[in-house]
Image (cartoon, rainbow, N blue to C red):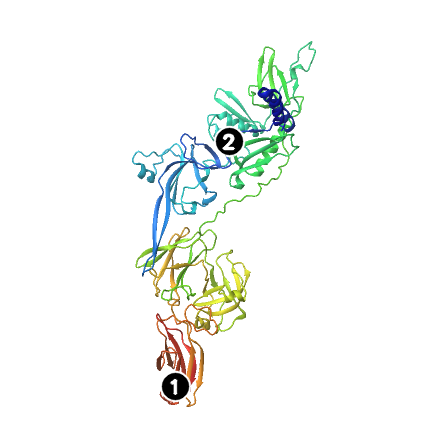
Amino acid sequence: MATLILSAVGTAIGGPLGGAVGALIGQQADAAIFGSGSQEGARLRELSITTSSYGQPLARHFGRMRVAGTIIWSTELVETRSKTGGGKGKPSTTTYSYSASFAVALASTPIDRVGRIWADGNLLRGASGDLKVGGEMRTYLSTGDSLADPVISADQGSSTPAFRDCAYVVFEDLQLGDFGNRIPVLTFEVFSVDDDSISLSQIVPQSTSVSDDVVLPHARGFSDEGGALASSLSVINSVIPFSCVTTADGLSFSATNVLPSNVPVLPEQLSRKNSEDADELFRQRGAGLGREPLALRYYDEDRDYQPGIQRALGRRPDGRETIVDLPAAMTSEGARQLANANAHRARWYGEKIVWRIGELDPQIQPGSVVSLPDREGFWLIKNWEWFDRGIELDLERLAPELGAVIPSDSGASNTAVDLTAPPTILRAIEVPPDGTTTSSSPLMFAAASADTLGWRGAALFVEQGTTLTEIGVTGNQRAVMGTLVSDISGSAGALFEPAATIEIELPADDMVFDSTDLMGIAMGENRLLLGGEVLQFMQAEAVESRRWRLSGLLRGRAGTEATAANGHSAGSDAVILDDSLTALDPSFVASASGSRIAAVGRGDSDPVYAELENVGLSRRPPNPVHALLNVLADGAWEICWTRRARGQWHWPDATEVPLIEERETYTVSFGPSASPHVVWTVSEARLTLSSSDRAALTTEHGSGSLWVRQLGTFGQSYPLFLTNIE
């Protein structure tokens, strides 16, 4: 703010020169008031994306990291067309899908394996190695004997390189429908050969260690993006202190936060006679000059390696805080511990002393930790200088050990759900029409589901002899289907049964049934196909995990009264009739006994087969209703009934239902319904039997029952009982 004000004032008074002077004074004022702030280390990549630019360095990755990589080879998009329908004069539908093959370089050092893969923020590959979309993936670990990838070789020819100097993955025919038909933004979870801990000997393999290797505490991964190695080491040293000295064997590292088992004690200091100040040789400089608490940014492993920040405990400094970007993967607790340890060391920073001795242990050198005979604590030898009257050592006080670990929290994270693709559960069913389809076409569906949300749909096939012909795909929505828990008795299906209940066992914990009301029942909601019966339910209640109680039943719907009258045994299949079902084209799937379809999903090692159930149900006319016997004046019987029509869920008052069939025809039979003695064929919903006709029937066949069936274009209805003749 002062910079803006003083710059404007200076410009108004002294022109451009006055403006520059005013801006300089304003900057000094702002720095004094707000603090300048600082950020150390290479900035963490907030939104790393897969690139394909020339000249970009390939990073070295240690431990476990999430990396973007660089595309090093790619094909053009491959278009695939699939045609469905088109039989018997129907229009066909052509579906286009796109795929691509490409290679992504991940690291310039060998790796052990690739874990999860994210595409546009969603999981493309799970922790178990399963791809969530179609395609294949191959991983090359940067070994010296790896061969060229066959797909790249087929595209590039005999001169194809094997890329043995980098680790990379190759995607073959990766389906791109979920990513807008383009190669998505990819990030990879990469594990190095040794992912248990990160040490300086891995980052600087030419170095040596004074004692044990210098391990980066709490770090589970580290990325070296290239550039000067001193820059990466400087960032590490700002958070994890270590000592580096030059020896005859090269660079030598030692940890300053880990004390050796035996800390040597320096001999007494030398003093000079006639010195005016006896403390001159062990002067103390800068004691208590600490830095502000540290804010550490890192890659949070608990949040899928997204950048996180942890702040040390302590009083916040005036102005802006110092933030250190450490390109390391760690947990929030580990990062908090590092931040607190750094702030703890800052309180001891600057306490130094010069110590002159006459004799030095050969094992002691710069980087060694020592103790003093008359002072507490431990000291680090920063450097030394040799004089004719002794050796002068510059010592720096090491901070005492930090106390208990402070708990931390990564914060809220919207991480991608990793669900393994489960096997497909499949049923093929024929159902009664709902009035929205043509009367001549059978209504068949594939009910596909699974026991977890990891199911993403399946390809459908029809069995034709010994081959499978693709007929389409299911959607991603799972059908709600299950099995009947216990036997249920038969029902006439004429009235709503508010006290009737059934229990259904579902295959998944997250599957649910929804309740409705009487108006919803009237509008056709909550239709359940149980065996060959269509029923509706009003209330749905979860009894226990996966088990639901359905109550308030209206049974024998859509002309399935005959099946409802027989009841159902435990284990009968049930499926909700809704838009989660996939329609089967009659041009490819025949409505005949023995017709089978198959499904193949991401979790299916072999095709899953299902035989068509309820063959003919969609085109079978419903049985007539409302039988009525009228006795005429001459003693003749006039037997009447009312026809119904396929697909007519609603029956408006004072309106005759449509015929639907090609002609109106009925068969009236006398005797057992399955093997009658006498059959009459009539073209209207009535039959007249005189007294002599009835007497002739009983004389020849004895007493018996009269039944009526409607003859439809594709079949006949179940029989309706009319009356007995005795």
- Position above or below: 304 against 352: below
Task: Give residue 645's position: percent from left, percent from top.
Answer: 41, 71
Task: Classify mark 2: helix, strand or loop.
Answer: loop
- Viewer can see residue 345: yes
Nearest the viewer among 265 and 377 is 377
Q: Position of 134 compared to 554: left or right?
A: left
Which residue is at 49% across, 60% downward? 506
Nearest the viewer among 386 and 221 is 221
Which image quarter holds the N terminus?
A: top right
Question: Dot 1, how many residues are within 10 Å of its Cα: few (below 14), some (14-19), or many (20+)?
Answer: some
Label drawn at residue 689 = 1
Residue 619 occupies which quadrant of the picture? bottom left
Q: Amino acid at mark 2?
A: Ser
Q: Position of 231 compared to 616: left or right?
A: right
- Position above or below: 546 against 237: below
Residue 85 occupies which quadrant of the picture? bottom left
Task: Classify mark 1: helix, strand or loop.
Answer: strand
Q: Amino acid at mark 1?
A: Leu
Whichever of labels 1 and 2 marks the residue nearer the N terminus, that label is 2
Q: CA distance from mark 1 to mark 2?
A: 103 Å
Task: Give residue 35's position: percent from left, percent from top.
Answer: 63, 28
Label drawn at residue 199 = 2
Which residue is at 62% across, 38% downward? 406
Q: Nearer the viewer, mark 1 or mark 2?
A: 1
Task: Give residue 487's position: percent from left, percent from top.
Answer: 49, 69
Which image quarter holds the C terminus?
A: bottom left
